[in-house]
Amino acid sequence: MKTADTHIRYELIPAPAYLQAYIRYFWTLEGDDPQALAKAFGSLVDGCPGLIFQRPDVGAFVRESKKLPEMFLYGQTTKNVEIASLGTSKATGVIFQPNGLKSVFGMNAGELTNDCVDVQLLPGNNHLPEQLADAGAAGTQVEVLSAWLHKRITGNPAAIDPQVDYAVRQIANSNGNTSLRDLQEKLQLTERTFERRFKEQVGITPKLFSRICQYQASLHQLKSNDYNKLSDIAFENDYADQSHFIRSFREFTGCSPYQFQKLLDEAGEEIMLIK
C-alpha cells in the first residue's frame, strides 16, 4: 500500500501455506517519515511477536532513544511504545502467530515480553542479516526468511502445544470474549496449569491476551469508521461501559479514542488499516 504523499510504502506479503500455522504474514516498509513504522503499524499491541530486519546503511529504528539492532526478534507488547527512525526507513519483517516464539524458536515466550533480542545472538542465525542485505529485493528477502524460518521450525523439538494453540484460536476468534473458565474446563486443565502453559507459549496470561484481542477489535472498528458514536464501539466489543473502553484504549494506544480519531482525520491514509 502506498500513501497519497509517498512518505510511506507498506506492503503485506502472505506467508506460504507451509508456514501459516506459525506466521501471519511478512511485510516490507519504506518511508522518509521518522514515524513511518508507527504510522504503518499503529499500536504494536496486537497479541503477536515479530521479527524486523532493517537496513542500517539507510536509517535505524530507535525505541525510547535506544538504537535497535540491525535484525531483532521481539516478544509480546503490552503497552504503548514509541519507535521512530533515524533517517529513511527501509525494513522487512515477520508477524508470527501469538505462540510463534515457542513454536518457531523454542523460547519461553515470557522472556521476551516487552523486550527484544538481537537475532545474531541466537544460535544458528547463519549470517542471516548479511544474506538479507545481499538479497536486495523484498520478494527475495521474504524467500530467504521463509527458508530460514522453515529450517528452524523443522529443527525445533518444542512443537506447538495443541491445547494452548486451541485456546489462542478460540480467544482470538471471539475477539477476546470467550469465557476463560469454560475454556479451561473444556481443556481439563487447572487454572494454574492453564495460565503457566499459556504464558510460556504466548508470553502473557490468557486474561491479558483476551483484553488485547478485545482492544484490537475495537481499534479495527474505529479505523474502519464502522460506528455512529464511541459508545457503540464499547457496547459491540463487550466492554462494561464506555469509560472501561476508553481506559483500555489509552493503555494500549497511548491516547484516547477521541485523540486517535482526530489523528485519523488529520493523517488520512498515513495511518493504515493493516491489522
Image (tube, grey):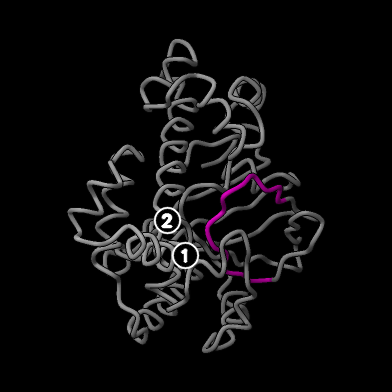
Give the CA distance from mark 1 to mark 2. Answer: 9 Å
Identify the disc placed on residue 148: none
Labelled disc at residue 139: 1
Q: Secondary structure at mark 1?
A: helix
Q: Quadrant of residue 228?
A: top left
How far from the left and from the top, in percent, is residue 164? Answer: 30, 62
Whether residue 87 is visible, yes or no, is no
Left or right: 13 with respect to 270? left
Q: Is residue 210 visible?
A: yes
Judging depth in this view, the residue of 107 and 89 nearest the camera is 107
Magenta residues: mostly which secondary structure?
loop
- Rate crowding at label 1 as few (under 14), some (14 to 19) or many (20 or more) other CA atoms within 10 Å: some
Mark closest to the chain's N terminus, 1 or 2: 2
Question: Residue 151, position in %: x, y?
Answer: 38, 83
Front-lying residue, 29 or 38: 38
| Residue appearing at x 32%, y 68% in the figure | 19
Instruction: Specify start and end residues of the magenta stretch as a single range.
Output: 70-83
The amino acid marked with disc number 2 is Ile
**Quarter of the figure with the C terminus:** top left
Residue at 68%, 41% (x, y): give it.
7
Look at label 1 and name its amino acid: Gly
Determine whether the residue tagged by mark 2 lies in a helix, strand or loop: strand
Q: Residues within 10 Å of mark 2 (few under 14, many from 20)?
A: some
Q: Is residue 80 left or right of residue 106?
A: right
- The quarter of the picture where residue 51 lies is bottom right
Image: 139 above or below 247:
below
Q: Are marks 1 and 2 in contact (CB under 8 Å)?
A: yes
Tell me if residue 72 is in the magenta stretch. Answer: yes
Residue located 40% across and 67% down the image: 201
User: According to the image, label 2 marks what residue?
Assistant: 13
Magenta stretch holds residue 123:
no
